């Protein structure tokens, strides 16, 4: 089949849509000539880009490997299983879900798996380094849930674990979130696990900004301590823009159900394959 499309073809794009082709080529030139220091705009590998632009983009695959709602999923099933096994092996996790379309989508799934609207969640405040999905009033998390916040000490600029424990005992949260967008220090996951156990809370770690350092064993992993870990697959991992969730085996069914059908329909299989490549 001479017309089979296997990857990006700028000549074909220039012939069909020169305006968009010019934009893509101009952006390629911009990236080549500038030094990029923003972690969330890391450069994906050619292999990842190949998967993203592959024929897997054509395949609809609602469900999970071996349990799809569409036929002809034999090949995409193989790709997803490989990705799942690689994620579990790399991070030492009991369960992995590669289907979330983004980090925020992964976080939505975590809320859906373990809480219901109106429940209390304890998370780092946005001004102290937290993320919009950790309870900001302009985000769904701050509108649907009663989010209490903890922060850092003024003298050390480290998480105030005494404050965290005191707030947790007072408000009895259903879930405690650790992880941030602007906290460059190590997080004491062992202490947070102890606090979660003291108040009966789910321990959730949003590891989007440091998961690559965990993969490289440069910093301690939250996986042995947390019930669930969510993160993005771009940034330091150099994968496609997307999300992923790791969890204990006991929570696997809840996580998978929250992702599909709870939060989204079919996964983007080209992105799932690209995530597997990045791992």
Image: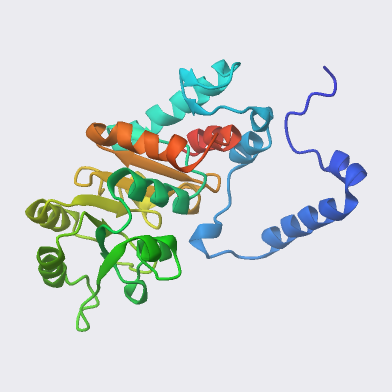
Q: Residue at x 60, y 34 (%)?
A: 270
Q: What is the x, y in percent for residue 217?
A: 30, 47
Residue nearest the viewer, comparing 127 with 109: 109
Q: Position of residue 165 (x, y in %)?
A: 11, 65
Q: Is residue 131 visible?
A: no
Residue 48, percent from left and from top: 59, 39
User: Dividing the picture into quarters, in which one does residue 8 lie?
Assistant: top right
Q: Is residue 272 above or below residue 157?
A: above
The residue positioned 92% from the left and 43% from the top of the image is: 15
Residue at the limit of the structure toward the right, as seen here: 15
Residue 14 showing in the rendered view:
yes
Locate the N terminus and report the quarter of the image it occupies.
Answer: top right
Residue 83 versus residue 178: which sits nearer the camera? 178
Is residue 230 positioned above or below 168 on the image?
above
Q: Give the left or right position of residue 42, taking residue 147 as reference.
A: right
Q: How many marks?
A: 0
Q: Nearer the viewer, residue 12 or 245?
A: 245
Position of residue 23 in the picture relative to residue 90 (left or right): right
Position above or below: 38 against 263: below
Where residue 83 appears, as percent x and y from the top left, is 45, 30
**Residue 206: quadrant of the picture:** bottom left
Residue furthest toward the left? 198
Seen at 19% across and 55% down, the residue is 189
- The correct choice, above or below, for 262 with respect to 29 in the image is above
For the C terminus, which image quadrant? top left
Residue at image point 43% right, 40% down: 262
* Quarter residue 148 falls in: bottom left
The coloring applied to the image is rainbow
């Amino acid at each position: 089949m001479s017309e089979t499309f296997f990857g990006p073809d700028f000549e074909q794009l220039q012939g069909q849509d020169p305006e968009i082709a010019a934009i893509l080529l101009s952006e390629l030139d911009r990236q080549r000539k500038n030094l990029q220091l923003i972690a969330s705009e890391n450069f994906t590998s050619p292999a990842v880009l190949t998967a993203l632009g592959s024929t897997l983009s054509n395949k609809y695959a609602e469900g999970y490997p071996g349990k799809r709602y569409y036929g002809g999923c034999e090949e995409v099933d193989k790709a997803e299983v490989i990705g799942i096994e690689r994620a579990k092996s790399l991070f030492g996790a009991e369960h992995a879900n590669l289907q979330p379309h983004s980090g925020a989508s992964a976080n939505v799934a975590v809320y859906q798996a373990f809480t219901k609207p109106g429940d209390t969640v304890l998370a780092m405040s946005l001004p102290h380094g937290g993320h919009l999905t950790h309870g900001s009033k302009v985000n769904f998390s701050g509108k649907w849930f009663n989010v209490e916040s903890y922060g850092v000490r003024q003298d050390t600029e480290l998480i105030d674990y005494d404050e965290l424990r005191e707030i947790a005992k007072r408000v009895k949260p259903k879930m405690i979130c650790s992880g941030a967008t602007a906290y460059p220090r190590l997080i004491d996951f062992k202490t947070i696990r102890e606090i979660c156990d003291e108040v009966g809370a789910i321990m959730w770690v949003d590891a989007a900004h440091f998961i690559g350092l965990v993969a490289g064993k440069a910093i301690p992993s939250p996986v042995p301590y947390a019930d669930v870990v969510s993160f993005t697959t771009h940034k330091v991992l150099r994968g496609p823009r997307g999300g992923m969730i790791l969890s204990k085996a006991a929570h696997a069914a809840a996580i998978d159900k929250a992702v599909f059908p709870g939060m989204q329909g079919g996964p983007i299989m080209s992105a799932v394959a690209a995530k597997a490549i990045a791992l």
